[in-house]
Amino acid sequence: MARKTVSSYINIDSPIDRLHPMTKIVAVLCFGIIGFASPTPILPYVFLLGLIYISHLAKLSKKFIRYVVPFGIPLLIMLLIIQGFFSAKNETVLYDFGFAQLGLEGTLYAVKQVGSVLVFLGSFYLFTTTTHPGKLVTSFVDAGVSPKIGYLLLATFQIFPQMQMRLSTIREAQVARGLEIEGNLLQRAGAFLPLIGPLVMSSLMSVQERGMTLETRGFGSSNKNITSFIEILDTNNQKIARKGMTILTILAVIGSILLSILKKG
């Protein structure tokens, strides 16, 4: 059964969950960079289909689709209006509406950009939901990153879920005391300050408590012998895959630069 932690991580045992965090980070960068560097709008959507399959392996396909589709449709409509009708690149007219002409070049550009954004956001969503924060920090520390920087990354991933949990608790407490937080715009605006005050104060107290906890756990110690309760296994196949994705990404960027130079020439 899935259980949510204080982070975005969803505890579901799957092949994607068991991958090394560095492998998933490299995959996110690979998909995102190649998607934007692609000269064709088709490749980002091929990646998007691949991400849907990966989300199926991660047992998160429904959540993934509910995350991507509501974001993608409004973005596509907005960019189609802006680029399709008003782009300076438009030369071929797809349809003449009388008051404006829909251009092929702008439409293709809008479709490509939306696909690239969805690939990056979708891959990052799968990364955050299938990667335990503790394993992520441990993988960075194993790679030679300072534990303090690792903690900073962990806190970054946890800050929004934590604030949502605190806000939900404060809202329930305020409702129990008779405060009206629903209704028209003025009523909700009046309830805003009573909600924000406790939220800010609890966040500041949490920062102080975490700082004290870090000191008691030796984060300020000069001792370089670092221990961890979490151990991550890294296989040779994953190391090879990371190198392959890195090389592929570099080649894609170089190819995109050369192609743009040839077009200008």
Image (cartoon, grey):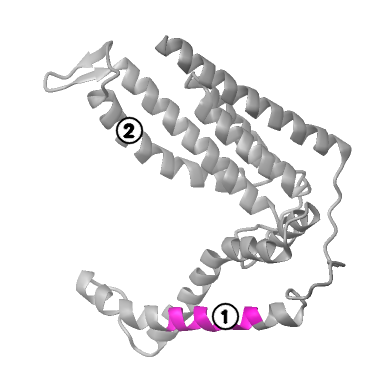
Occupied quadrant, residue 255: top right
Occupied quadrant, residue 226: bottom right
User: Residue pushed farthest bottom?
Assistant: 177
Which residue is labeled 1 in the image?
A: 206
Is residue 208 positioned above or below 253 on the image? Answer: below
Disc 2 residue type (three-letter)? Leu
Which residue is labeled 2 in the image?
A: 79
* Mark drawn on residue 163: none
Q: Which residues are magenta?
A: 198-211
Q: How packed is label 2: few (under 14 Cα within 10 Å), some, or many (20 or more)? A: some
User: Residue pushed farthest front?
Assistant: 222
Q: Position of residue 141 (x, y in %)?
A: 76, 58
Q: Position of residue 80 (x, y in %)?
A: 31, 29
In the rendered image, which quarter contains the N terminus? bottom right
Disc 1 residue type (three-letter)? Ser
Cα gap from disc 1 to disc 2, whole angstroms = 41 Å
